[in-house]
């Protein structure tokens, strides 16, 4: 864990930050982005957001809308199922109020969006993970709602979701014909994975660490990646599925519906398996081979958001590091560019073996575009004269102070 965390920290201080490497880490076995502090930095970058860009507060956009009553009822039942021993009841309450404001602000800012039960579960994970900047958390939630969940939020019904879910069984059959045949023989419909796909496991999984790890993968993969994960979870349970005494609809459906809530969910195995499925049968090919004619027609018209990925307006393979963005922000505000935070990040980048270009714009004697390194330029004659004068001044002060006065000054200083 420590070695992986160090590798991620080295990546996020590079200029530019290699987002494709971070996405590959999230989709590979391991611990994802390790902790919530790193997730709060990486998730916005994956979504093309700049945390230092001045934006109006989302609190100004909170207004009552047609969904407010349902949002209030759903939020009142949220956050209770996560086991957080160090979170007090008051803290859960504040996060719950923030969640309600955030959803209402989204629905007010985008009147064409449609709220559905399960949407609040997705945003609840964002609220619990990204606790330092509420406006940045709202920006992440907005990107997720518009692009990753667009087929559910931008339509008044689940007319696109239904044919998308029907791709589950062909996906399972392509990986394992026996499991696929068993599900079809039992009459299992793809609706068994409905809560997993639309809520990103946030409704069924009671472990916040596992859910956050899944979000690492969901934000690094295409919008249909939850469907691939659902297929991987069913395939992973093959042995237990075939061991069931009764293989009728009721028994198999009950067994499958409990998979996502297991406390020992093998999340790393599932993500790796889902990624292999994704590489072997990408979404466009899956829809072309096994999609419903209605879905294929919408795909040809570019009306399926899950298939219009990546989005060129914000999806990037590289991004500037936060320390550079902070310098640019401070420069725009007319403040000192090299604050303590950016000096630490620049040093961290140097220790990681990365030569970092200076921030755009010349400050003091810095040359625009020069490479930053640990080697400093030789002191000028002026700086040497200033240093010598300072030494002489200090010596003069000490000479005028008597020994007793000096001891008294030292004593007062220490006390």
Image: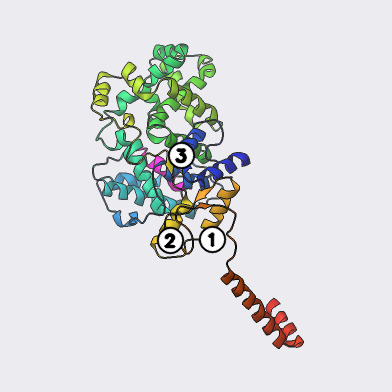
Measure the C-alpha gap from mark 2 to mark 1: 12 Å
The quarter of the picture where the N terminus appears is: top right
Residue where numbered disc 2 is placed = 330
Please say if the residues under marks 2 and 1 sit with CB atoms less than 8 Å apart: no
- Please, what secondary structure does the residue beneath circle 2 have? helix
Q: Which residue sits at x=54%, y=57%? A: 343
Crowd class of label 2 (few under 14; some 14 to 19; many from 20; radius 10 Å)? some
Q: Nearer the viewer, residue 88 or 221?
A: 221
Residue 117, magenta (yes or no): yes
Residue where numbered disc 3 is placed = 19
The quarter of the picture where the C terminus appears is: bottom right
Segment colored magenta? 116-131
- Is residue 269 something one can see in this rendering? yes
**Residue 266: image tag:** none
By secondary structure, the bulk of the magenta-drawn segment is best described as helix
- Please, what secondary structure does the residue beneath circle 1 have? helix
Residue 398, given in percent of the width and then of the height, sits at 70, 83
Q: Which residue sits at x=28%, y=28%? A: 160
Query: Position of 294 compared to 273: left or right?
Result: left
- In primary-sequence order, the first of circles 3 and 2 is 3
């Amino acid at each position: 864990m420590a070695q992986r965390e160090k590798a991620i920290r080295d990546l996020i201080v590079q200029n530019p930050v290699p987002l494709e490497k971070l996405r590959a880490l999230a989709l590979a076995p391991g611990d994802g982005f390790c902790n919530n502090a790193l997730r709060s930095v990486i998730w916005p970058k994956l979504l093309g957001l700049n945390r230092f860009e001045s934006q109006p507060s989302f609190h100004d956009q909170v207004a009552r809308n047609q969904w407010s009553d349902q949002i209030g009822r759903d939020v009142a039942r949220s956050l209770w199922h996560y086991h957080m021993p160090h979170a007090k009841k008051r803290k859960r309450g504040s996060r719950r109020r923030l969640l309600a404001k955030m959803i209402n602000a989204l629905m007010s800012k985008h009147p064409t969006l449609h709220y559905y039960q399960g949407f609040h579960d997705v945003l609840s994970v964002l609220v619990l993970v990204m606790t330092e900047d509420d406006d940045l958390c709202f920006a992440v939630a907005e990107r997720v709602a518009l692009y990753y969940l667009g087929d559910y939020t931008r339509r008044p019904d689940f007319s696109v979701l239904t044919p998308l879910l029907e791709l589950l069984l062909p996906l399972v059959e392509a990986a394992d014909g026996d499991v696929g045949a068993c599900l079809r023989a039992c009459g299992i419909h793809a609706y068994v994975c409905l809560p997993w796909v639309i809520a990103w496991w946030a409704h069924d999984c009671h472990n916040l660490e596992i859910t956050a790890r899944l979000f690492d993968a969901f934000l690094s993969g295409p919008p249909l990646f939850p469907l691939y994960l659902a297929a991987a979870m069913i395939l992973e349970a093959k042995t237990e599925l075939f061991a069931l005494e009764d293989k009728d609809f009721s028994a198999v459906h009950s067994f499958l519906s409990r998979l996502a809530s297991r406390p020992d969910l093998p999340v790393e195995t599932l993500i790796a398996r889902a990624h292999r499925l994704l590489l072997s049968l990408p979404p466009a090919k899956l829809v072309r081979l096994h999609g419903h004619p209605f879905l294929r027609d919408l795909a040809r018209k570019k009306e399926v958001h899950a298939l219009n990925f990546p989005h060129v307006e914000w999806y990037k393979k590289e991004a500037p590091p936060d320390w550079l963005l902070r310098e640019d922000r401070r420069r725009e505000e007319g403040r000192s560019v090299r604050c303590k935070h950016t000096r630490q990040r620049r040093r961290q980048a140097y220790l990681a073996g990365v030569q970092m270009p200076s921030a755009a714009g010349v400050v003091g004697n810095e040359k625009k575009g020069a490479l930053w390194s640990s080697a400093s330029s030789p002191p000028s004659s002026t700086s040497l004269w200033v240093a010598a004068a300072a030494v002489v001044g200090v010596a003069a002060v000490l000479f005028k102070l008597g020994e007793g006065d000096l001891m008294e000054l030292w004593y007062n200083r220490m006390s």
